[in-house]
Image (cartoon, helix red, strand yellow):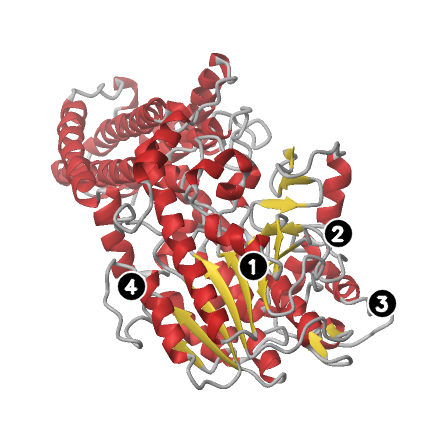
């Protein structure tokens, strides 16, 4: 039976309902564009001073086109659950009007919440919703929640979002109640003619919205091609919150299937052969390709080895232009000591903590897969894993953390990959002082007490205190916070100088606690070796427009018995996954076999370090996602961008492809 024939009102009811869907479409489109403009205005300090007004207009125009997709998705729900049902149940039209209003209200709430959360998210990560969202979803939810309450104003932001939703719902209700145009009398009793006209018009409208203001994919706009301005902030503004979350989803899907920048699955055997120079090897397992042979020790075998990762420990406070902040004097003193060494060409494994820890624990470079949540990581030990290889040298291997052991599944990963123990703050009975755990002083005090009478052990240590919420009274502990504020107020392009001073004060606190621990431990156990670096740099920046180096580079200090200024090449290049092979070449006996994807920093073989965002060479820093390059701040020499980028291209796809293969497919090289 023709669904239009039984009740003549079906067609007219459907026609009126579609008009209301269009009103919802334009309502959502206007809303996300308005939120974009407010966000752009509210954080206008992040727009470069050299950006012309024409690019601001361009960003809004391209954003409007892109937001057609977002509004289209939102209107589609109303079409599916309000307009189409009217064809079947025309007498329930009033009910479906309420359904449409509820849909619009829920969508308004979602966009209002995302809009208000976008401000602190961008300030934190200089990005509009990225992989950090998925990392947070797998994080300690309770800790994330309380951090959002204490540091980012979750309560008042939710209250504002609810208020906005009420206002928006009332406005939408008025808009939907406006009288609709009647169905032209020509279509009375002619539902098939109506359908023959409606469907092509609907299809054209769908294409125009689907492709972002075009009828073809080539002429349209999508989240990948939307960055049309020269300003990074404006390019992020182009993505409305719906498109930004869509980007998160798509990137997560690509990561899971290996569609990641730098992962070239078809070249796995080539990369495996190149990894350790075994060009004539033809094995079906990846481990033999990653086998390396130690050339002989550079220093006497230490009793204890400490690999210390400082939370958000960026290297930029060490740069001469920021030395007045005195936030890293302790680490600088260790590096300057006769038995200290520092490299300025060190990149973290990624831009959040778990990626760094994944690299230390498993030996795998960042490649878009959350290794700590791969089932394989819990049932198989990677050939490149730290703990089993250090055990073969006679060490126990422990992990010390200032938070809860179960955070991001790290205790499970570490123990599955061969660590002997994993200690979180409840295990050493430290007080919980923030939502993330205990302050660093309690972490290192517990570790020091634990050393008494302990057999030779490698200790991987992850600090916590330099993390929102920044609650430590650093002034009472000796940091000149007022002087820091005077300096940050004088620094150009700083959005919130007082907040920056407080954050720098927390870097000072971390630096002080770590340095005090190193000095105290060295005095009691002089045959110790310390490796000090940061898990990532992203969070505290010296300006609204930090350089790539300032945004991503972390310190690398080697300190202890036997260390000299020439123990590694000057400014040796490396990252988290170079630590294990470097340790092996420093202390392992000649002929000792070990496994790693990347080489030791002792030989100067590696020409670039890299992470999610950047690569670093001996002369330059560049983006992994664009052609942007800049000179290293500590190197005053001309460079050719293409030459420096080629140095990075020799190593980045190799490390990412092999790491991805082992995490997702295992060690077998069968396709």
Furthest residue in direction top, as rendered:
53
Disc number lying in front (1 or 3)? 3
Q: Using residue 277 as the reference point, say whether residue 314 is left or right of it.
A: left
Mark 4: few/some/many CA within 10 Å (<14, 14-19, 20+): many
415 or 167: which is nearer to us? 415
Q: CA distance from mark 3 to mark 4?
A: 49 Å
* Mark 1, secondary structure of its residue: helix
Question: Which residue position is annotated with label 4?
Answer: 438
Which label's residue is closer to the chain start, 1 or 4? Answer: 1
Q: Nearer the viewer, mark 3 or mark 4?
A: 4
Distance between mark 2 and mark 1 Cα atoms: 23 Å
In front of the other: label 2 or label 1?
2
**Horizontal and vertical percent position of residue 648:** 71, 48
| Spatial separation of the CA atoms under disc 1 and disc 4 | 38 Å
Residue position for label 2? 650
The answer to which of marks 1 and 3 sits earlier in the sequence is 1
Estimate how packed mark 2 is, as few (under 14), some (14 to 19) or many (20 or more) residues with alpha carbons within 10 Å. some
Residue 591 spot, x, y in % from top left:
78, 81
Residue 45 placed where, x, y %? 39, 24
Residue at numbered disc 3 = 279
Q: Secondary structure at mark 3?
A: loop
Work out whether 122 lies above or below 363. above
Provide the secondary structure element on which disc 2 rests.
loop
Whole-Å distance between the Cαs marked 1 and 3?
A: 28 Å
Q: Earlier in the sequence, mark 2 or mark 1?
A: 1
Q: Please name which of the two marks, 2 or 4, marks the residue nearer to the observer.
A: 4
Earlier sequence position, callout 3 versus callout 4:
3
Which circle's residue, 2 or 3, is located before the other in the chain? 3
Image point (27%, 31%), residue name? 21
């Amino acid at each position: 039976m023709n669904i239009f024939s039984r009740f003549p009102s079906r067609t007219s009811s459907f026609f009126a309902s579609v008009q209301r869907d269009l009103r919802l479409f334009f309502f959502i489109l206007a809303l996300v564009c308005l939120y974009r403009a407010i966000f752009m205005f509210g954080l206008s300090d992040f727009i470069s001073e050299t950006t012309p007004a024409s690019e601001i207009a361009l960003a809004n125009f391209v954003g409007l086109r892109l937001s057609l997709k977002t509004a289209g998705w939102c209107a589609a729900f109303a079409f599916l659950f309000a307009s189409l049902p009217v064809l079947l149940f025309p007498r329930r039209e009033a009910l479906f009007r309420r359904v449409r209003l509820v849909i619009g209200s829920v969508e308004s709430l979602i966009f209002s919440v995302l809009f208000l959360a976008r401000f602190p998210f961008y300030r934190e990560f200089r990005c509009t919703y990225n992989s950090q969202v998925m990392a947070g979803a797998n994080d300690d939810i309770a800790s994330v929640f309380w951090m959002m309450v204490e540091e980012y104003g979750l309560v008042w932001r939710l209250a504002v979002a609810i208020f906005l939703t009420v206002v928006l719902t009332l406005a939408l209700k008025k808009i939907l109640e406006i009288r609709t145009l009647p169905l032209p009398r020509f279509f009375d009793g002619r539902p098939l003619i109506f359908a023959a006209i409606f469907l092509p018009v609907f299809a054209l409208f769908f294409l125009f919205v689907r492709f972002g203001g075009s009828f073809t994919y080539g002429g349209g706009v999508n989240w990948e091609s939307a960055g049309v301005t020269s300003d990074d902030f404006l390019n992020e503004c182009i993505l409305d919150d719906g498109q930004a979350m869509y980007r998160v989803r798509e990137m997560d899907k690509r990561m899971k299937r290996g569609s990641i920048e730098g992962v070239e699955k078809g070249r796995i055997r080539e990369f495996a052969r190149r990894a350790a120079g075994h060009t004539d090897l033809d094995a079906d397992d990846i481990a033999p390709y990653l086998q390396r042979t130690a050339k002989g020790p550079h220093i006497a075998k230490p009793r204890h080895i400490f690999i210390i990762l400082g939370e958000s420990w960026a290297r930029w406070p060490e740069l001469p232009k920021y030395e007045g902040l005195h936030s890293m004097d302790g680490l600088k003193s260790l590096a300057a000591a006769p038995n200290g060494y520092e490299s300025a060409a060190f990149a973290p494994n990624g831009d959040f903590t778990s990626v760094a820890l994944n690299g230390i624990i498993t030996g795998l470079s960042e490649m878009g897969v959350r290794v700590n949540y791969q089932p394989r990581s819990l049932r198989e030990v990677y050939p490149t894993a730290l703990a089993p290889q250090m055990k073969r040298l006679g060490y126990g291997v422990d992990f010390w953390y200032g938070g809860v052991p179960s955070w991001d599944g790290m205790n499970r990963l570490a123990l599955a990959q061969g660590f002997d123990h994993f200690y979180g703050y409840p295990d050493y009975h430290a007080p919980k002082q923030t939502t993330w755990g205990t302050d660093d002083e309690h972490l290192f005090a517990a570790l020091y007490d634990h050393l008494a009478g302990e057999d030779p052990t490698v200790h991987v240590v992850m600090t916590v205190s330099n993390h929102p919420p920044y609650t430590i009274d650093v002034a009472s502990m000796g940091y000149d916070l007022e002087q820091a504020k005077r300096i940050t107020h004088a620094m150009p392009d700083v959005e919130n100088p007082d907040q920056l001073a407080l954050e720098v004060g927390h870097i000072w606190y971390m630096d002080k606690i770590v340095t005090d621990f190193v000095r105290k431990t060295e005095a009691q156990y002089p045959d110790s070796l310390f490796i000090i670096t940061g898990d990532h740099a992203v969070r505290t920046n010296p300006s609204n427009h930090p350089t790539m180096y300032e945004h991503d580079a972390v310190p690398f200090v080697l300190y202890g018995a036997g260390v000299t200024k020439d123990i590694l090449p000057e400014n040796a290049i490396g990252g988290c996954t170079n630590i294990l092979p470097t340790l092996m070449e420093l202390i392992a006996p000649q002929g000792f076999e070990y496994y790693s994807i990347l080489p030791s920093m002792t030989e100067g073989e590696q020409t670039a370090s890299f992470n999610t965002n950047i690569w670093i060479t001996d002369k330059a820093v560049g983006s992994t996602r664009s052609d942007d390059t800049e000179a290293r701040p500590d190197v005053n020499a001309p460079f050719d961008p293409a030459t420096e980028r080629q140095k990075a291209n020799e190593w980045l796809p190799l490390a990412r492809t092999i790491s991805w293969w082992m995490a997702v497919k295992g060690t077998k090289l069968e396709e």
